[in-house]
Structure formats: C-alpha cells, structure tokens
Amino acid sequence: MNSNINIQEAIKEAKRCLNCAHPLCRTGCPIENDIPGFIKAVAQGNIGQASAIIAERSNLPAVCGRVCPHELQCEAHCVLSKKNCGIRIGMLERFVADFVETMNICEPVKISSRHGKVAVIGSGPAGLTVAGDLAKLGFEVTVFEAQPEPGGVLLFGIPGFRLSKDVVNREIAKIKRLGVNFRTNVLVGPDITIDQMFAEGFDAIFIGTGTALPKVLNIPGCTLPGVLTATYFLSTVTLFQSGHLEAKEIPVTTDDRVLVIGAGNVAIDAARTALRLGAQSVTVAYRRTVKEITALPSEYEAAVQEGIQFRWLVSPLRYVGEIKVSGLAVELLEADVAGDIHPTGKQEIIPADKILLAIGQRPAARIVSTTEGISVDSYGYVITKERPYGMTTRPGVFAGGDVVHGPKTVVLAMKEAKKVAAGIAMYVEAKKLLEACN
Ligand SMILES: Cc1cc2nc3c(=O)[nH]c(=O)nc-3n(C[C@H](O)[C@H](O)[C@H](O)COP(=O)(O)OP(=O)(O)OC[C@H]3O[C@@H](n4cnc5c(N)ncnc54)[C@H](O)[C@@H]3O)c2cc1C
Ligand code: SF4
C-alpha cells in the first residue's frame, strides 16, 4: 500500500523540478493537474499542501499515481525528459497520496447538501469522479453499483499486483467521507429503472457504466468449454480474493496452458494473472506486431521478464478440440517493409487448455433498453450533448467515461466525468430556478 520512496527521496526528486513558467507537464495531463504547484509543495516538505493541490483536480490520486500512463503523458511532456532526466511525476503523485493517508492528514470536509439530488450509475473512475466533484459542490449524491463492492474496473479488472484493492478502497472511503452514499448489488435496468429513480426524487442521473460486454470471436469451436473472456477471468479472481467466490470458480488451474488473444492492457493483465495462479505456460497471441500493441510499454516489458511468451502475426481461424478446447488454429501472417500485413497461407495449431479473449469490450444495453429516449450509436455508445455538457437525448440523464467514448484509460474517463459533473451542476441549478419560478 505504501509508496516505494521516503520523504527525503521525494523532496530530493521534487527539488529537481524547474517550476517552468509554461509547464508542459501540465498540458500533458488530461485533467490538467497543477503539477508544478504540487511538486513545489513537496520540495518545501509541505505534503498536506501538495495533496490539497492535487485534490483540486483529482479524486483518485493514489489510483492515478499507480495506473496512469505517466510515461506517455505528463512525464513525456516534462522539459527535462528531453535530457533523459524527466521528473518522475507519477511516483511523486503516488508518494503524496500514500503519505497523507498514512499520516492521516487532509481529511476532506463534508459539505452540507443544499443543491439537489443526483444519482450516479456505476462506480468506476467516471462515476467516482462525478460523485466526488458534485459532493464537493454541495449535491446529495447516491451511487448505484451492480457489483457487491464499488470501484468498477479499478477493483474488478486491474489486478491487485498492479493496483491493490486497499488503495481503491481507501479512495472510495475518502469519497464516502464527502457524504456520498453507495448502493451496491443494484443492477440498474432490471432492478430499478431510470424512471423509478426520477420518481425517487433525483434531479439528474449520470450513467457511467463502462463497457461491460466483452467482444467474442465467432469462429468455429467458439462454444467449446475452456474458451472464455479475459475480463470474466479477471473478475473471478477479484471476487475470489474478496471472499465472494470459491477458488474452484476461477477458470484457470495450475495444469493449464493458457493462450490469451489480444495485446492491450486487458490481455497483459490476464496473462500475468494466469501466470501468478501457476498456469503451466502463458502465451499471448496477436495478429499484428509488437509495434502495434496497445498495452503500456512498461506492462509489456514486465510480462516478457516474467516469462510470458508472445506470438506475433497470427490470425485465429478456429478453436480446436472435441469435448473441450485443446488449441487454437491460426494462420501465420507476415509484415512487409512498409508495415502492411499479409496472409502467408501457412497454418499452425497453438496448443491451449484455456483461451482467454481480450479483443475489446462494448457497452451493455441494460439501461437504454429499459428507458425511453436515450439514443446510442450503432455500437451501443451513448450519444451526449455539448451543452449542458454530457447530457443524453433524455433531459436530466447524463453519461460519461467508457460508455460514451469507448474503452480508453482511467484518467480519460475522469477527464470527461469532470466536465459532465459541471454540466450536471449547471442543469440542476437551472431546473431548481425554474421550479422556484412556478
Ligand atoms: C483489465 C483492465 C486493465 C486496465 N488497465 C488500465 C491501466 O493500467 N491504466 C488505465 O489508465 N486504464 C486501464 N484500463 C482502462 C480503464 O480501467 C477504463 O478505461 C476505466 O475504468 C473506465 O472507467 P468507467 O468509469 O467509464 O467504467 P468502469 O470502470 O467500467 O466502471 C463501470 C461501472 O459500472 C457498473 N455498472 C455497469 N452497468 C451497471 C448497471 N446497469 N447498474 C449498476 N452498475 C452498473 C460496473 O459494475 C462498473 O463498476 C484497464 C481496463 C481493464 C478492463
Ligand atoms: S515540465 Fe518538468 S521541470 Fe517543468 S514544471 Fe513540469 S515537471 Fe517541473
């Protein structure tokens, strides 16, 4: 749970910052954290002040300090990076978040509610950001979450060895201390509809339900036992670790040769988790080359070091097996000098006892199918407006995060959610004004 640097090391690192007049690090941060401001406070040894500066823009610093792609964002933009000695901003953010928690400082203040009632559906980074921002503005917020615990992908997707469940739980505890209520084990749509929520007196409703449906490969053999989705596998591991499932429900065992299809963050997380469960071997198969993978470079390098095998330029043809899966038949591809990929006509069978699919996700339709007036595009993503920011085609219903823009990153879901929270505040204020005039 704790940072891997101490306060002396944090101050030493912070003192290297040039406190640039035009800080490029800040433009590289999707939520425009005041990076030079918080680093200056760290350099002065004022960690409470540093935490307060980060809290102006982020409700999830301990999470962002661990899973944000800093090396592609703020750290890539830092002027010192050009000289190969960029400030390790992610490490400092993580240090500050952990330090204030350990020292129990910077307790957020609960603001007495006065502006109106907002329901937030989903407790991933988007839902938590909307809930935290609106609670700070004085709204009464209730979060509805389908899972037994809040956290979304932070808890049920990203494995604990990258983002500890304690860290997620303590960020949620902070949001609870702002006065936000959580109702878990509630699947909005079947259990309660949007119309019933309005009837309960909510002034506005935010949909932050992410992309719950994993994409599948409809090739021959797709119904064979042993063919699974990577997100299902990862969620069973978390549910087991938090006592909601028995070990036998985890679909990967120590004898398994595991094959993961895909090469994004989900694929690498599933592969590294399978290895930690003691799988006999773990191979990642991808139809392109290492240059095109969407996983973070640091995650890929960690996977290679841990002994995960990679098969590039293979295209799945069919799952092999009779009673259960025993392999994947693939066509071998080749890349020409321009990087274009062509079939070779050659085939191979990669042996596997479990095949985990990590080829993308899309939104479920549980809410839009039970609610009139919420338009989605042809892939099921919710369509939203610019003004008030994030409102759907149904007045008073807003949406943000992966359910709107597709699977991206934690910080991009937060960035959009911050703008939607401002849109909701504007909408509820106008609604209350009109009600007062009638
Ligand atoms: C395995 C994995 C690893 C990842 N690694 C990284 C990483 O290292 N860094 C990074 O920046 N990003 C990473 N991502 C992406 C990132 O986690 C997502 O982009 C982000 O979580 C999206 O946030 P969200 O709030 O929109 O949705 P989610 O986090 O998906 O949260 C949606 C929530 O809504 C709930 N929900 C859905 N439907 C309903 C309903 N009808 N009623 C009630 N609740 C409902 C779900 O249970 C869930 O809790 C990863 C994603 C995965 C799957
Ligand atoms: S760009 Fe680098 S050196 Fe300049 S303020 Fe940001 S972190 Fe400090």
Image (cartoon, rainbow, N blue to C red):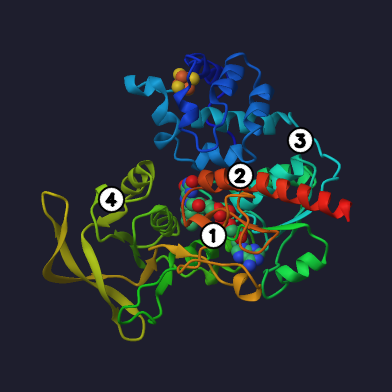
Assess disc 1: are there few (<14), some (14-19) or many (≥20) residues with their C-alpha within 10 Å of its C-alpha: many
Q: Element type at marker 1?
A: helix
Q: Which mark is residue 419?
A: 2
Q: Element type at marker 3?
A: loop
Q: Is residue 187 visible?
A: yes
Residue type at mark 3? Answer: Pro
Side (left or right) of 18 relative to 56: left
Q: Element type at marker 4?
A: helix
Q: Element type at marker 2?
A: helix
The answer to the question of whether label 1 and label 2 lie on touching residues, with beta carbons closer than 8 A, is no
The answer to the question of whether label 4 and label 2 lie on touching residues, with beta carbons closer than 8 A, is no
Q: Name the spot of residue 425 as percent of width and height, x first.
A: 72, 46
Residue type at mark 2? Answer: Lys
Q: Quadrant of the N terminus?
A: top right
Q: Residue at x 78, y 53 (%)?
A: 431
Assess disc 2: are there few (<14), some (14-19) or many (≥20) residues with their C-alpha within 10 Å of its C-alpha: some
Mark 3 and mark 1 lie on one chain; the one further toward the N terminus is 3
Q: Is mark 2 within 8 Å of ligand 1?
A: no
Measured in 3D between alpha carbons, the distance from the residue under mark 2 to the one under mark 3, in whole angstroms, is 21 Å
Give the residue pinned by disc 4: 292
Residue type at mark 4? Answer: Glu
Q: Name the spot of residue 73 as percent of width and height, x first.
A: 43, 35
Comparing labels 3 and 1, the label whose residue is closer to the camera: 1
Mark 2 and mark 3 lie on one chain; the one further toward the N terminus is 3
Mark 1 and mark 2 lie on one chain; the one further toward the N terminus is 1
